[in-house]
Amino acid sequence: MTTPLPLDGTDELVCTQWIATIPGFTRTMVGTTLPPDVNADGTPALWVATGFVTVAVAGGGPDPELPVNWPVMQIDCWATVPGSNKPPWNQAAALAGAIRRATWDRRNISRPLQITANGIAYPAAAVRTAYMPTAFRRIYDDQGDYARLQADLALSWVTVNDRLY
């Protein structure tokens, strides 16, 4: 019988969960891939009303001597009005502003994050520090009705109660 490998959180899982716990956000508003803006039945997707945030690793890495992760994440804030050629920049900016403000909230940055993905529970994690090394900027190369703001988010996070072997 083989021993299963221990589960470890990933930078994407921790980042999406951390953003999802910012006041005004929900887990359905954050992911690694932008969902379609229209459901199969032709109705607007739920995220159209709230906006959506995608995350991806842009750089950084683990500490070479300690079980601390230091990723730099690419954050994209999306908003759309289907059928319109006027991107809702203010809606995307509201998402971006809430994320930026959360990095200044020193009392609440480090909060336990219960991480689940695809029905799998991962060990709890805690973000220790979060800051924006770049400002949010408009990205214009998308479809005409999408507003997209992009910036980098640097995190320091650990697995709660991590034990080294």
Image (cartoon, rainbow, N blue to C red):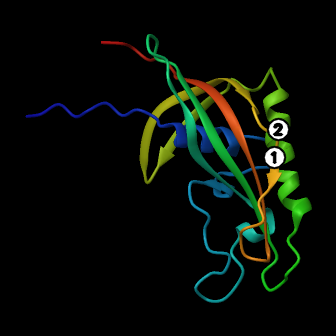
Residue 136 numbered mark, or none: 1
Q: Residue at x 77, y 37 (%)?
A: 134
Q: Are marks 1 and 2 in contact (CB under 8 Å)?
A: yes
Q: Residue at x 68, y 47 (%)?
A: 75
Q: Seen in the image, is 131 located left or right of residue 89?
A: left
**Residue 51 place in picture, x, y as percent:** 77, 62
User: Which element carries disc 1, helix, strand or loop?
Assistant: loop
Q: Amino acid at mark 1?
A: Phe
- From the viewer's perspective, is the residue at label 1 or at label 2 nearer? 1
Q: Seen in the image, is 76 located left or right of residue 49?
A: left
Residue 100 numbered mark, or none: 2
Q: Residue at x 80, y 21 (%)?
A: 106
Residue 40 numbered mark, or none: none
Q: Quadrant of residue 58?
A: top right
Number of numbered discs visible in the structure rendering = 2
Q: Quadrant of residue 151?
A: top right
User: Which element carries disc 2, helix, strand or loop?
Assistant: helix
**Residue 68 place in picture, x, y as percent:** 51, 19
Q: Quadrant of residue 104?
A: top right
Question: Label 1: few (<14), some or many (≥20) within 10 Å?
Answer: many
Question: Label 2: few (<14), some or many (≥20) within 10 Å?
Answer: some
Q: Amino acid at mark 2?
A: Arg
Q: Is residue 123 above or below residue 145?
A: above
- Give the position of the N terminus as an image quadrant: top left
